């Protein structure tokens, strides 16, 4: 049996946590031969609810669960963590401006970045799901100077999967027949779902759909999918978000399928002229537990403009929190 991997999850008593933990525990994320120790973080008032979730985890008698801890202290939850899924965040309250939301989360993610810096494994892989995910990831990263900055990522895999599902519906293909979708930029309504390099059953996607559908239906549908789910379900995406977090970490740790890429929000190294440092979603391949941004894709005028718009938003978010960063 392999040695257990320590997986820290924040916001563990929340909606996403309720799907995510059971899938990690069943081996969907790290493999059916990989034991895990779950290290769960919640705010103090949610510890009682978290106790109930832990009781249910125990009642599943998962063969791969080698231990479960709970805490309301980040240093405890992140102790020696190999993987940290930062799901808990401050939701937007009534009358809260975007700036207030950024600042409230800056406080949370500064503290969690410091705790990761002090307590986690030196190779910890961090995925931020809690919104505004990209900028929260940047804040955590900047507060963790002793960790590899490349190991701080944010989740756009849900957007990626949503885009695949839309294109599969439109073309009558199965989602497994769609390869090399790209989400560029921010996990927000400015994100750019790009099908210019995507194939459907090996054929170039742009030749299979009308341009008008692509620009005026597909792109806004993917961008607004989160809001559509809230409207229909009365609650925000949870199981699909958990599934995408599983996909993001699984690919990062175990590798993307040969010849395919995925979308991950990672620190920009200046690829495609995107401002260095911001956490921007790029097409990435993963191998040997590391990721690489796909280079040298041809970018047309339409794409360039959309990539710039979402870069601009991330740049503004960074400026809004810059004074709070070390
Ligand atoms: P819930 O409100 O159900 O759960 C959040 C949990 O986090 C709560 O139990 C809360 O007590 C806890 N929490 C809050 N502050 C914390 C802190 N400082 N430390 C530890 N725990 C803390 O929200 P849920 O539906 O689970 O969504 C979680 C986050 O994911 C939200 O920020 C949401 O906006 C974001 N999402 C991000 C997505 C993405 O694609 N990147 C998609 C889904 C989701 O909307």
Image (cartoon, rainbow, N blue to C red):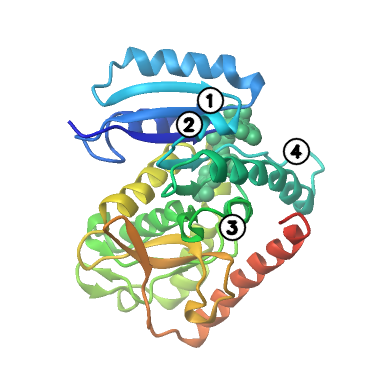
Label number found at residue 93: 4
Sooner in the amino-acid sequence: mark 3 or mark 2:
2
Sooner in the amino-acid sequence: mark 1 or mark 3:
1
- C-alpha span from label 1 to label 2: 6 Å
- Is disc 4 in contact with disc 3, using a CB cutoff of under 8 Å? no
Residue under pointer 2: 17
Which image quadrant: the N terminus?
top left
**Residue depicted at 38% across the width and 77% down the height:** 196
Sooner in the amino-acid sequence: mark 2 or mark 4:
2
Tell me residue 265's x, y (percent). Answer: 48, 60
Q: Nearer the viewer, residue 240 or 318?
A: 318
Label number found at residue 188: 3
Is 78 placed left or right of 199 in the picture? right
Nearest to the eye among marks 1 and 4: give it: 1
* Distance from mark 1 CB to nearest ligand 1 atom below 8 Å: yes
Tag 4 secondary structure: loop
* Distance from mark 2 CB to nearest ligand 1 atom below 8 Å: yes
Label number found at residue 287: none
């Amino acid at each position: 049996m392999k040695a257990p991997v320590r997986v820290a999850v924040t916001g563990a008593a929340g909606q996403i946590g309720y799907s995510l933990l059971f899938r990690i525990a069943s081996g969907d994320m790290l493999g059916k031969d990989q034991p895990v120790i779950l290290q769960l973080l919640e705010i103090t008032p949610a510890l009682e609810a978290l106790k109930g979730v832990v009781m249910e985890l125990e009642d599943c008698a998962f063969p791969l669960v080698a231990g479960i801890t709970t805490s309301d202290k980040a240093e405890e939850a992140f102790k020696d963590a190999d993987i940290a899924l930062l799901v808990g965040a401050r939701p937007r309250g009534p009358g809260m401006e975007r700036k207030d939301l950024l600042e409230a989360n800056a406080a949370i993610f500064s503290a969690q970045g410091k705790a990761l810096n002090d307590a986690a494994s030196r190779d910890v892989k961090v995925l931020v799901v809690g919104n505004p995910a990209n900028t929260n990831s940047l804040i955590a990263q900047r507060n963790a100077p002793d960790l590899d900055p490349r190991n701080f990522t944010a989740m756009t895999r849900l957007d990626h999967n949503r885009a695949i599902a839309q294109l599969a519906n439109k073309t009558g293909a199965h989602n497994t027949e769609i390869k090399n979708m790209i989400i560029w930029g921010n996990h927000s309504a400015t994100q750019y779902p790009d099908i210019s390099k995507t194939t459907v059953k090996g054929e170039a996607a742009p030749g299979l759909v009308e341009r008008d559908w692509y620009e005026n239906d597909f792109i806004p549908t993917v961008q607004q999918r989160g809001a559509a789910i809230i409207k229909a379900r009365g609650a925000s995406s949870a199981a699909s978000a958990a599934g995408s977090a599983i996909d993001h970490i699984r690919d990062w740790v175990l590798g993307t399928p040969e010849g395919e890429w995925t979308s991950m929000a990672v620190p920009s190294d200046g690829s495609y002229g995107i401002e260095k440092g911001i956490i921007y979603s790029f097409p990435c391949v993963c191998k040997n537990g590391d990721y690489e941004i796909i280079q040298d894709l041809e970018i047309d005028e339409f794409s360039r403009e959309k990539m710039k718009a979402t870069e601009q938003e991330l740049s503004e978010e960074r400026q809004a929190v810059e004074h709070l960063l070390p």
